Amino acid sequence: MRLLPRRNPRKFTKAESFCLFIEGVRALQLYDKEAYNPQPDKLVLDTNLDEAEAKFRKCVEEYPKDILPLYYYGIVLTLRGQVGEALQLQHELEANRPGARLASGGDEHDRLFLKAAAVFEKVSQQTGGDLLAYAEYNQALALARTAPIRSHGTVR
């Protein structure tokens, strides 16, 4: 496997990239602030997470050499998977069936976590230092949240 050249994660291709990145970070901050309310508003949470994802995705698509937006996009994908897991658990508890993996949700959560893990892998190939350690850590966390993947009777 050929590693991509290491880049400074604090450098942005253009000012527009930095602006999109900051808008995404701001939306994540608003999401986080709302999440810590005693009774968070689901619509506000969804709106802020949607906005953060849209800003980071646009930044990644238009400025693929910029590393921080890619890293934060992975964070958003992980958050989406965690939200889905929490809603699934809430549904299971309401149905009095804790632990039963719902056919309608588990695969989608795994898809989000696997996509996040792939994003963190890409970040780790392009950077070094602290961000490399954070990317590897978040990749491991995302993979740990997925269901075991079986191939020919063995767990990979």
Image (cartoon, rainbow, N blue to C red):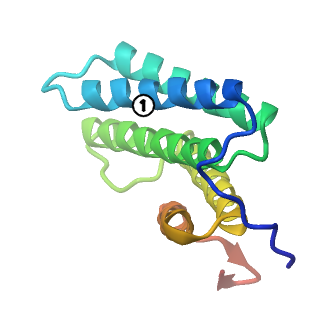
Q: Which residue lies furthest to the right in this view?
A: 2
8 sits left or right of 134 in the view = right
Residue ID for mark 1: 28
Is 86 situated above or below 46?
Answer: below
Residue, x 75% and y 38% (percent of image)?
13
Amino acid type shown at disc 1: Leu
Position in image of residue 1 (x %, y %): 85, 79
Q: What percent of the width, then of the height, locates residue 145? A: 48, 61
Position of residue 4 measured from the top left corner of the image (x, y, whole percent): 82, 67
| Residue 93 in picture, x, y percent from top left | 26, 42
Q: Residue at x 60, y 47 (%)?
A: 68
Compared with 107, 129 (above or below) is below
- The front one of 155 and 27 is 27
Does 89 appear above or below 141? above
Residue found at x 78% / y 36%: 63
Tell me which corner region of the image, top left, top right, bottom left or bottom right, holds residue 15: top right
> Viewer-proximal residue, 153 or 50?
50
Compared across the picture, whether 4 is left or right of 110 comes to right
Label 1 crowd (10 A; few <14 / some 14-19 / many >=20) = many
Determine the residue positioned at 54% across, 20% down.
Answer: 51
